[in-house]
Image (cartoon, rainbow, N blue to C red):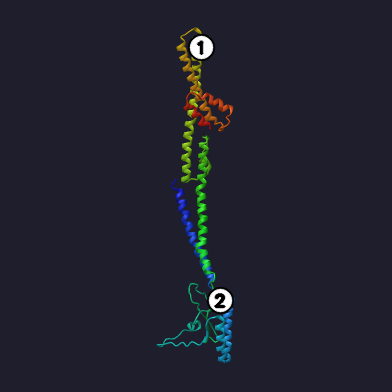
Amino acid sequence: MNRRLFWKLCLGVALGSVALFWVIARLSGQAEEQMSFIDADHQRTLRQYALQAEELYRAGDEQALRDWLSSLQRQEQTWAAVVQPQLQALAGSELSKRFLSEFSLGRDPSWKIHLYFQDNPIMDVPFADGQRHFLIQLPQRMRPGHYWYPARLLLELVLPLILLVIGCLLLYRHLMRPLNRLQQATRRFSEGDYEARAGVLLGSRRDELAGLAATFDSMAERIGSLIIDQRQRLAEMSHELRTPLARIEMAVSLAEQSGAPTILLRRIRQDCTAMRALVEDSLTLSWLETERPRCATRRWISPICSTALSTTHVSNFRTATSIRNFQ
């Protein structure tokens, strides 16, 4: 059978493990991606702060701008500033227009925030002229990813545990279903149903368990055949012994009537009685094994069983054996 069950289990475990890792990585990446951006309302708030700073700067009232920045820092428990960076190229080099247009001292509010950094990043919102920038360290209340660590625990511990338990249950069910059916067939065979077979119960399986069921069926067929043949031979032997026994008893009766020696005739009759008892015991034992009457009660025994017990009186051993067979 080329170890179908082995390869099936290997393939299932391998594919299941790869699928589990892929799902966890995929879900973790998506969750981190969605939690790494500042909320839209907070982005609008930051841009509104930059717009207010720009209006105060254009008004030319530096004291008002300074007071506003101090109030903002106390309100958000962070720092903020308005800066004008001076970029000067050295050694005859030149700054490209793209660099000048994209240069910033911090992150744009729409950019992704790394959740693994402990310190909050610096947010940079340029003024309309592009020469001055409003800088503010991201307030803690605006920091994204507040639920990242619980979500990470859920995705990396709870979810794999649940999926592994489900996989183990499916694997257990796949293995135990044929074993339960094999156990069912074994129980039926042990209870006297010698026609019980396990291969029929397994259906179209062609793996190692199906091979085990086929071996059991072969064993059950041979043992059942041997038991049936043995019972049949025992029954035929018992029936064949009845005829000569009847003739011997008739001859003994005639000898007794004709006045033969009493001691010899008594001895012959005793032997005939013992032989008849042996035959009756054999027939009773065969009947008990074949019919298996249910009379296993201690306080009451049915008439059939009591009749059967009365015939099994050759020896204590045979009597005990017969009682055990139908109890």
Report whether residue 103 is seen. no
Q: Position of residue 174 (x, y in %)?
A: 51, 49
Residue 152 at x, y percent in the picture: 51, 66
Q: CA distance from mark 2 to mark 1?
A: 120 Å
Q: Which residue is situated farthest in the front direction here? A: 299
Residue bearing mark 2: 141
Residue depicted at 55% across the width and 30% down the height: 291
Callout 2, which amino acid? Arg
The mark nearer the N terminus, 2 or 1, is 2
Give the answer, above or below, for where 218 lies relative to 152: above
Residue indicated by mark 1: 253
Between marks 2 and 1 in the image, the one whose residue lies nearer the viewer:
1
Q: Quadrant of the N terminus?
A: top left
Hey, which residue is sitting farthest bottom in the picture? Answer: 60
Above or below: residue 200 compared with residue 147: above
Name the one closer to the observer, 270 or 2.
270
Residue 210 spot, x, y in % from top left: 48, 44
- Badge 2 crowding class, 10 Å Cα cut-off, few under 14, some 14 to 19, many 20 or more, is few
Q: Position of residue 117 (x, y in %)?
A: 48, 74
Work out whether 307 lies above or below 269.
below
SS state under label 2: helix
Q: Secondary structure at mark 1?
A: helix
Give the residue furthest to the top.
258
The answer, for residue 174, to whether it is visible in the render is yes
Residue placed most toward the observer, 192 or 225 = 192
Mark 1, other Cα within 10 Å: few <14 / some 14–19 / many ≥20: few
The residue depicted at 57 percent of the width and 90 percent of the height is: 64
Residue 44 occupies quadrant: bottom right
